[in-house]
Amino acid sequence: MAVLLTGGAGYIGSHTALCIANAGLDVVVLDNLSNSSPEAIRRVSELTGKEIPLIIGDCTNKDDLEKAFSAYPIDQVVHFAGLKAVGESVAKPLMYYRNNLDASLTLLEVMAAHGCNQLVFSSSATVYGTIQEMPLKENFPLGCTNPYGWTKLMSEQIFRDVGKADLGLSIVLLRYFNPVGAHESGRIGEDPNGIPNNLMPFICQVAKGRLERLSIFGNDYPTKDGTGVRDYIHVMDLAEGHLAALKYAREHRGVEVFNLGTGVGYSVLDMVHAFEEVNHIQVPYRIAPRRPGDIATCYADPTKAHDLLHWQTHRTLTDMCRDAWNWQNNNPMGYRNA
Ligand code: NAD
Ligand code: WQD
């Protein structure tokens, strides 16, 4: 049997492909390469010594998904495929709703047609909206502040309804916090298009000299040093969370939701200082105005994932900073010159 990773050539998908292939599962990737490179999957094959088939196809296209399900004995799916840039989603909401919702719907239809009933979905801490009570627990009220977030919350709702209608389904919704870092080999990592939106790739590109300096968005938040606090999680810990979720889906029916975070919050200044110390490199920065839509603090209560998935994070902030830099330093232009 095989696990299909939609969007598996992307940042989290490629690390998960590596993790679950190393655990002995057969992996098939379907990706339209709109935000990724086939080189990522070539390198995962190289690192694992296993052939990882890559189907270049679109998750909103039934025929493309059919190709995957007819060619391989797929009994589980991890659904990463989606557009993820918050700002772009505000400018192009229709593109986000069309792509992200259509992908979830089409995938569910093709899975049903092939009797595949186990799914793990990439949701996001963004579905907690602007709640101020921390740490965030899975049963807190939900709401979003941008179209990207709504596509995640609406997809969650679709999966919950489908799971209610068909009691044979196993669906695991994973709410990721802030994934950072890279595989320790430095061969795969995060390769954003254009100027990065997220903090860690921005820090890496400043350290490498691709960008002049970091703008820290606000130092007047009600946090220990005034800068925003987030729950950064090493992408390999996150990948291991998917392995645990696939096991859980094999053993349980129904729909369940889990936070995947460390439970610890670090500020932007913590991240900059840790990066500088661990890697012995300067990260020039300036304080800039707050970024619209940002919240002061966000971190997970990961207790449910500890208890039911028997998963927890092992990697430290030092590991995150070292591995992010190892990838950036060895691949200054990401996969582009490969
Ligand atoms: P990514 O952009 O690196 O990976 C997503 C992949 O999906 C890309 O390879 C892209 O080419 C592919 N894709 C997009 N639309 C597709 C479609 N219609 N058909 C086929 N492939 C398609 O992003 P990532 O950081 O690896 O995120 C993976 C998933 O996790 C996404 O759904 C994202 O929304 C979610 N997520 C990410 C974060 C984060 O901070 N990185 C946090 C929470 C949730
Ligand atoms: C982290 C902190 C910024 C860049 C986003 C999405 C969320 C999820 C994860 C997908 C904040 C500060 C950042 C910079 C800065 N993605 N910052 N200068 O905003 O927590 O979450 O990615 O689901 O939906 O919103 O992550 O990395 O952008 O920001 O000061 O150049 O770093 O203000 O405090 P965020 P981030």
Image (cartoon, rainbow, N blue to C red):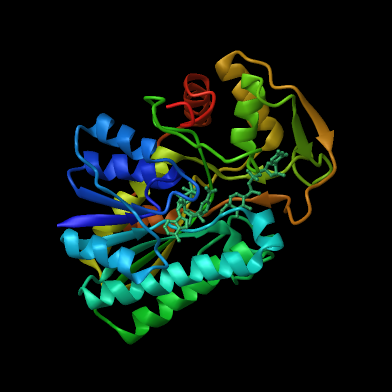
Residue at horizontal 82%, vertical 39%?
219
In-front residue for pair 153/31: 31
Screen quadrant of the N terminus: bottom left
Could you say where residue 335 lies in the image, as x and y percent from the top left? 46, 31
Residue at horizontal 66%, vertical 20%?
209
Residue lying at the far bottom of the rendered structure: 165
Residue at horizontal 60%, vertical 24%?
275
Describe residue 91's horizontal placement relative to residue 328 as left or right: right
Does residue 139 appear in this view?
Answer: no
Which image quarter: residue 105?
A: bottom left
State whether residue 257 is above or below residue 158: above
In-front residue for pair 243/122: 122
Which image quarter: residue 40?
A: top left
Describe residue 98's horizontal placement relative to residue 106 as left or right: right
In-front residue for pair 321/333: 333
Describe residue 261's horizontal placement relative to residue 283 as left or right: left
Which image quarter: residue 22?
A: top left
Could you say where residue 195 lies in the image, as x and y percent from the top left? 66, 38
Residue at horizontal 81%, vertical 46%?
290
Screen quadrant of the C terminus: top left
